[in-house]
Image: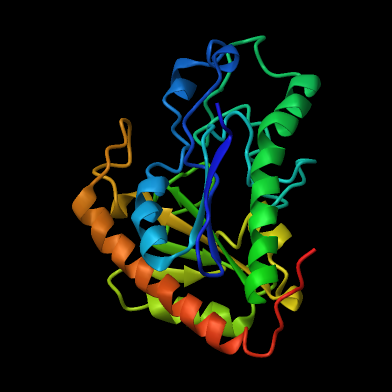
Amino acid sequence: MKTHQLYQGRVPLLISVPHAGTFVPADIKRRMTEAALKLPDTDWHQEKIYYDMHEELGASLLTATHSRYVVDLNRAPDDTELYPGKLKTGLVPLDTFEGDKLYQDGEEPDPIEKANRVTAYWHPYHDALQGELARMRREFGIALLYDGHSIASTVPRLFDGVLPDLNLGTVNGESCAAALEQCFYAALENKGFSTVLNERFIGGYITRNYGKPAQNIHALQMELTWKNYMQQEVWPYHYAPEKAEKLAAVLKDALAALIDFATEEFSRNVQPLARG
């Protein structure tokens, strides 16, 4: 089975969806607990949120097929901590966000298996991501990376209280030019959803690693809360089309504004890189 799907667009925006995959290989699945088999930490239905949108915008879309329980594509390959001092969810997770064990006793992956998963599943996704950003930078002189995520609005083990609806992160301004950050954030405000910038989620490995404003590669991470596009935030995680349509319309308009502003203001004086 393929590890990812890439749809190539016609504008310099790549929408990355690394945590919506639900496939678990049989040799891993048979060792997992009942709690883990429900895949509770999946970024449920993100591919639905962004699929029609990417076609209408002309953006590229990269989606993962495999569950984050196989390997977490938004963690560094050496498993460096993203938020020092906070509870860690690792490169190859061993428990759920709620603290339930992923594996039956004695069935946890050993270091060799973990390394093999990185080779088999992590690297192909990142090769595709890096290649698409390079193509955009080469053809347009600029590349925009939007890393799409979602989560339950309350996860007491990971954070206090209730999350806002839209959680935008740019690594405190390091992964994206300030003008682009503000353009996108302004397009989200006052649209019926609570919105914050660089609060609980400032951006994971993908945003931090690929966002290079000095090279005109700008990365933003969005963490949506499930309540705005799902019927309930519990298993079986049913999609709510009417809710999702309202949310998607706001996101699409904001991304369209970002594309327009970026291509007008940031590509104007940047020559596309030569091929070869």
Q: Is residue 110 left or right of residue 22?
A: right
Instruction: Answer yes or no: is residue 88 visible.
Output: no
Residue lying at the far left in this picture: please name it: 242
Residue lying at the far front in this picture: please name it: 276
Query: How has the structure been colored for display?
Result: rainbow
Image coordinates for residue 38, horizontal then vertical, percent = 41, 25
Q: Is residue 209 left or right of residue 132?
A: right
Nearest the eye: 116 or 153: 116
Q: Who's the residue at 23% across and 55% down the image?
A: 243
Q: Who's the residue at 61% across and 59% down the image?
A: 203
Q: Who's the residue at 23% across and 44% down the image?
A: 231
Nearest the eye: 28 or 200: 28
21, above or below 191, in the image:
above
Image coordinates for residue 50, horizontal then vertical, percent = 40, 55
Image quarter where the C terminus lies is bottom right
Image coordinates for residue 174, horizontal then vertical, percent = 70, 72
188, above or below 152, in the image:
below
Image coordinates for residue 62, horizontal then vertical, percent = 53, 50
Nearest the eye: 89 or 15: 15
